[in-house]
Image (cartoon, rainbow, N blue to C red):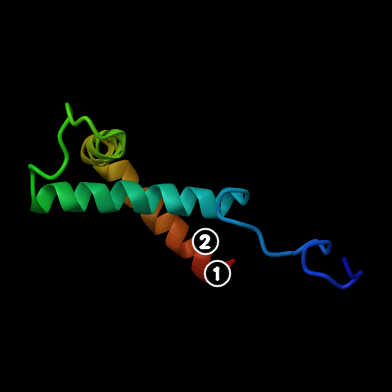
Amino acid sequence: MREGSPCLSASPAQSALFDMPSLVVVLVLFICTCTYLRSMKTTLFAQDSPNSFLRGCWKASRVGERLSPYMSIVCVVMALHLVFF
């Protein structure tokens, strides 16, 4: 390959999976989205679903329901972090 090839050069941009603040934002948004969708349509996620993704969404919505005050504080802190830092 050529020396200037994008495969050989290290890119400063990282995926959200390898950057801790971005990973936290993705997880918080996933939990909030699952909680909101479950509040709109309660039968969307089932605890005994054969689909493991839907079971994961059900668990995330339960976390969002039970830790609602803490999740809202985390959302505000992450929003302030994204705006000011």
Measured from the top left, where is residue 67 in percent x and y? 28, 37
Residue drawn at the location 83% of the way across and 61% of the way down: 8
Residue drawn at the location 8% of the way across and 44% of the way down: 42
Residue at which label 1 appears: 84
> Which quadrant would the N terminus be assigned to in this image?
bottom right
Q: Which residue lies furthest to the top in this view?
A: 48
Location of residue 56 by image quarter: top left
Measured from the top left, where is residue 9 in percent x and y? 83, 64
Query: Identity of the amino acid at label 2?
Result: His
Q: What element carries label 2?
A: helix
Q: Residue furthest front?
A: 1
> Which quadrant would the C terminus be assigned to in this image?
bottom right
Q: Residue furthest right?
A: 3
Residue drawn at the location 52% of the way across and 61% of the way down: 81
Tell which of 65 and 2 is nearer to you: 2
Residue at which label 2 appears: 81
* Residue 63 horizontal side relative to residue 7, left or right: left
Q: In the rendered view, tell whether residue 23 sits above or below residue 48.
A: below
Residue drawn at the location 92% of the way across and 69% of the way down: 3
